[in-house]
Image (cartoon, grey):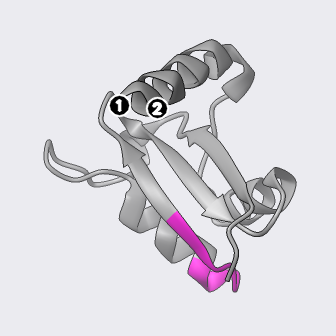
């Protein structure tokens, strides 16, 4: 399965999730996407428990809709766009 898209998201409020210091939001996101029949790879971000990247063959709007259907509140990622670009640039330079 080719994963042509890479989408960055951040959960708006982690309060509804039972996470400790060692657990990220990734398993909850993977579960929600699987329930919607979406094949994807989800990567957590080291800098934030609430940030994650979805690798999929679907456009961002479909992923976002699936997450919202499962009542996963997403933050406005436009506010974080600069940070995501810098993160990916740093990962590229490693």
Q: Is residue 80 left or right of residue 27?
A: right
The N terminus lies in quadrant = bottom right
Alpha-carbon distance for marks 1 and 2? 19 Å
- Along the line of sight, which residue is nearer the eye, 88 or 31? 88
**On the image, numbered disc 2 is attached to which residue?**
92
Q: Secondary structure at mark 2?
A: helix
Q: Picture coordinates of residue 81 (x, y %)? A: 66, 20
Say if mark 1 contacts mark 2, CB within 8 Å.
no
The C terminus lies in quadrant = top left
Upstream in sequence: badge 1 or badge 2 = 1
Residue 36 location, quadrant:
bottom right
Residue at 63% over, 31% down: 75
Task: Confirm whether the magenta stretch covers residue 9.
Answer: no
Residue at 51% over, 23% down: 89
Q: Which mark is residue 26?
A: none
Q: Picture coordinates of residue 49 (x, y %)? A: 33, 38
**On the image, numbered disc 1 is attached to which residue?**
48
Characterize the local packing of mark 2: few (<14), some (14-19) or many (20 or more) Cα atoms within 10 angstroms.
Answer: few
Residue at 52% over, 68% down: 41
Q: Is residue 30 left or right of residue 82?
A: left
Q: Which residues are magenta?
A: 34-41
């Amino acid at each position: 399965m080719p994963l042509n898209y890479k989408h960055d998201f951040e959960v708006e409020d982690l309060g509804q999730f039972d996470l400790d210091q060692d657990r990220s939001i990734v398993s909850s996101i993977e579960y929600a996407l699987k329930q919607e029949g979406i094949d994807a790879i989800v990567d957590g971000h080291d800098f934030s428990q609430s940030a994650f990247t979805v690798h999929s063959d679907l456009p961002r709007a479909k992923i976002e809709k699936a997450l919202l259907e499962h009542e996963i509140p997403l933050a406005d990622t436009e506010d974080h766009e600069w940070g995501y670009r810098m993160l990916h640039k740093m990962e590229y330079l490693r």
